[in-house]
Image (cartoon, coloured by chain):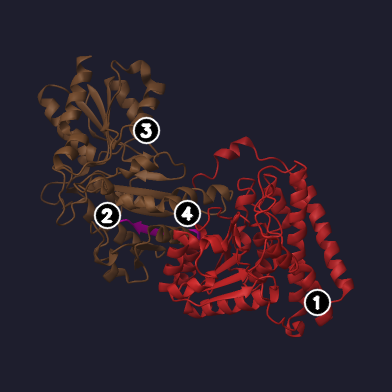
Amino acid sequence: MSTHSVSIAPDKETRRDLTIVQALREAIREEMHRDESIFVIGEDIRIGGSFLFTLGLLDEFGPDRVINTPISEAGFVGLAIGAAIQGMRPVVDFQYGDFLFTAYDQIVQQCTKLRYMSGGQVKIPLVIQMPTGASGRGAQHANAMEGFFFHVPGLKIVTPATPYDAKGLFKAALQDDNPVLFCVHKHLYGSKGRPLERSSLSRGYVPEGDYVIPLGVADIKRPGTDVTVVANSLMLHRALNAAEDLAKQGISVEVIDPRCLVPMDMNTIIESVQKTSRLVIVEETNERGGWGAQVAADVAGRAIGYLDAPIRRVATPDVPIPFSPVLETAVIPSEERIRAAVLELMRT
Amino acid sequence: MKIIKPNPPQLKDLTGYDGALLVEIYRRMYLIRHFEQRVNELFLKGIMPGTIHLSLGQEATTVGACLALQPNDVITLTHRGHGQALAKGVKAYALMAELFGKVTGCCKGKGGSLHVGDMSVGALPAIAIVGASSPIAAGIAFAFKYYQTGQIALNFFGEGTANKGDWHEALNLAAIWKLPVVFLCENNLYGVSTHITDVMAIDYVAERAAAYGMPGVTIYGNDPILVYDTVQEAAAHARRGNGPTLVECLTYRRGGHKRDDPATYRPTEEVEIWMKTDPIPAFRARLEADTRVGEAQLALVEESVMQELEEAVAFALNSAEPPAEMALEHVYA
């Protein structure tokens, strides 16, 4: 099962294009009007937070539901867990996802385990909205955070790449009864004053009003027949650009956006590999133990007989992210590296 | 090493207190003491799995604090949580079954000694990472305030917790937002083997309350009435919308940190002073001296507790193990 977000856009005259941050703001406003148990908490959110996700919420919903915090990540994540246990639906806004490490125990040991350890006595519906990935700020503001949490049972991990997906997935996350990490790449928000990735989909059509994209459903962003490329978040845009380029050379690339890393829609990926017989996985996480390794293992386990070539992974090497723009560009997967991986598979 | 003394104040006359409350205080302390002694025996015999952290000697603090709350108030528990759970009203048989990892346990056998609790009596299954429960308790209080339910949260922790970052963050958040929560420190002087004077440059944890702008008080924690009165006042303060209070109760572990710890790191003088402060015989003597609750009634209470414990052990031993597929349940809601 998959939904094709690109194909539902109406005519040029009537369509409304938004960035991801605009789509997310619309989603949370609609949900906060619908559900009084939702509140937002985080640092500097009265002025919109780092990426302006919460811009305007204080005026609209007041200080009881839009809570500006001290610099106390463990404290306010723990507080959100407690509030969720008592029936609220907190949205924790992180300035940078990288700061989640200071709340690691609260997320990994408390948030994901209290339900399990208590034999199902509590549920913790909680969304953490977090900027992820490298954006020219050096090693401590550049982690692809989704990778660090991929191993943890009890979390769901969403990595939207387009404004349409962001709104629908954010609504699904807010309505889910489990903790959800909602990871948006720093180059994809499109916040004022921030660079936006150059791509045909980084701005796009977002319907007004309610729609929900279920968690755990991948989307074929570009159909193709020769090679399957699985790529999420920022990497999806680079994969699409690479695919467009490769089409000029007569290579038909199918680009799949998993949209959620947990739960992962393996069926859509397997079906594609059965058709193309070649697989490239692109992720911004460090290569060792990245989510792409799990996808590769699952494809090998379930569909190795369909493969005509080895599985190729394009990931960030196992280094911290350097500051120098030249060095950062060298380690983060690029269109060029994705093209090269596809071409290599086509030669085998 | 500096000896921290109990310094009990002049004991209050019990005549002004409700007789049923006084008997219930005694019953719960007696239940906790004998529950834990029973657990210790079962453990040493090798019948009970896992590990255990006993709270022998700290019963007055947990019972005084929990009985000062309303039934629908919520507590968070520590790794040393059997007493806190029983004090809040978790049933002895469900707690015993949990320690055996049985499916009839209060957490279906998936929590064990370190994670006991029952939300139906307002006891959030225990958080066994030191400090982590304090922000969560503040969050429970946040929801109570948001929905204006009039309930409060009470966060149990030990004195060692007062050096953890999560704890500091939680006290600050609770103070700035005036959350209805009581931070209840069971100061038993030791974090495992490490004495409080080795890890704090001040004498008492409650001194830190001033740094957050909340009231703080240090009391003798082996008098359940003193604890009861103090926590009631802190709870009323919270319910009136005035925010949190830090209540520090001085008490003492009558044994080691856990089952295999002989606690030889404690100075003899300190042990001698504190071993004389056993709250249970002391409170029993006060009841007999101050009230109409006589020896006969207390003997009946004790007998019924022992009967309850016999039944709890039998229930736990006769209960089924959890089915293997339960290991995969309760990960997601």
Q: Are marks 2 and 1 in contact (CB under 8 Å)?
A: no
Q: Which residue is mark 3?
A: A289
At x 77%, y 52%, the residue is B38
Q: Position of residue B210 (x, y in %)?
A: 46, 76
Which quadrant would residue B166 be assigned to in this image? bottom left
Instruction: Look at chain A in the picture and name its colour.
Output: brown
At x 74%, y 50%, the residue is B40
Q: Position of residue A89 (x, y in %)?
A: 42, 59
Q: The numbered mark 2 sits on a residue in which chain?
A: A
Q: The numbered mark 3 sits on a residue in which chain?
A: A
Closest to the observer, B53 or A177: B53
Report the magenta residues as a range.
A85-94
- Asked if the stretch drawn in magenta spans residue A176, the answer is no
Confirm whether circles 1 and 4 share one chain. Answer: no
Relative placement, left or right, of B246 versus B254 is left
Instruction: Report helix, strand or loop for mark 2.
Output: helix
At x 27%, y 32%, the residue is A315
At x 47%, y 59%, the residue is B164
Closest to the observer, A314 or B49: B49
Q: Badge 1: few (under 14), some or many (20 or more) residues near its Cα, within 10 Å?
A: many
Q: Amino acid at mark 1?
A: Leu
Q: Amino acid at mark 3?
A: Gly
Q: Amino acid at mark 4?
A: Ile
The dot on residue A24 is 2
Q: Which residue is mark 1?
A: B287
Mark closest to the chain's N terminus, 4 or 2: 2
What whole-number distance in Å separates the C-alpha atoms at marks 4 and 2?
21 Å
What whole-number distance in Å separates the C-alpha atoms at marks 1 and 4?
44 Å
